[in-house]
Image (cartoon, helix red, strand yellow):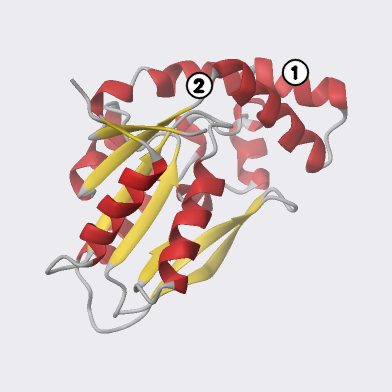
Amino acid sequence: MTPRYDEVTARLRAIELVKGSRRSILGLAGSPGAGKSTYAETLVGDLAAEGHPVALVPMDGFHLAHAQLAVLGLTTVKGAPQTFDIDGYLTLLRRLRAPSGRTVWAPRFDRDLDEPIAAGIPVSDETRLVVTEGNYLLLDQGPWATVRDLLDECWFLGLDPELRRERLTARHVRHGRGPGEARARTTGSDEANARLVEATRTRADAVLELS
């Protein structure tokens, strides 16, 4: 049975990973709106404030640019697995697993622009724990199946589905969508992606139930 963590247990485990003999990569998977980004930012921020050498590298930096989604006819399913540069993400994970003595620059995702930004996140050579978060870290289809092998651990973030959808709709509104469009996005492509992600829960090392 997959272990269940609360936030205290999860934090203690993250500190163990930081103190390991080599750099570790911790994945945080979960459905859209489950709170991955907020939790990851809080965890990394708290550890960094205590002097631990950690970095956060979200998978969202590998979204395809909107212009390319339009060319490929994928605009309406943005956020689905086929709308990411999975090969680029795998290459970055491999580089992060083998520190070279130089800073590695990772892309970030700008939610206001709704676009990826190249070389926006520095990961110094001294970093001992890299936290990466995204929907599909546990997906076992096509090249995505390789991601799990490049992570030392991967936790699945669980959240009540109704609360998750409420938060996701509110997020869409904050980023410029009207209420109707936000609800349609949440119950449409986002919910389809959520069903795909939920099916990967059993591949996690632990399930983290957020309050």
**Closest to the observer: 28 or 104?**
28
**Closest to the observer: 187 or 164?**
164
Tell me, yes or no, if residue 48 can be seen here.
Answer: yes
Where is residue 149, by image quadrant? top left
Residue type marked 1 = Ala
Disc 1 designates what residue?
A: 184
Q: Could you tell whether 185 is left or right of 145 in the image?
A: right
Q: Could you tell whether 42 is left or right of 156 in the image?
A: right
Q: Is residue 178 above or below residue 146?
A: above
Where is residue 103, by image quadrant? bottom left
Q: Is residue 129 above or below residue 115?
A: below
Horizontal and vertical percent position of residue 34: 53, 32
Mark 1 or mark 2, earlier in chain: 1
Disc 2 designates what residue?
A: 194
Residue type marked 2 = Ala
Which residue is at the far bottom? 101
Tell me, yes or no, if residue 94 can be seen here.
Answer: no
Q: Residues within 10 Å of mark 2 (few under 14, many from 20)?
A: many
Q: Secondary structure at mark 2?
A: helix
Q: Residues within 10 Å of mark 1 (few under 14, many from 20)?
A: some
**Closest to the observer: 89 or 187?**
187
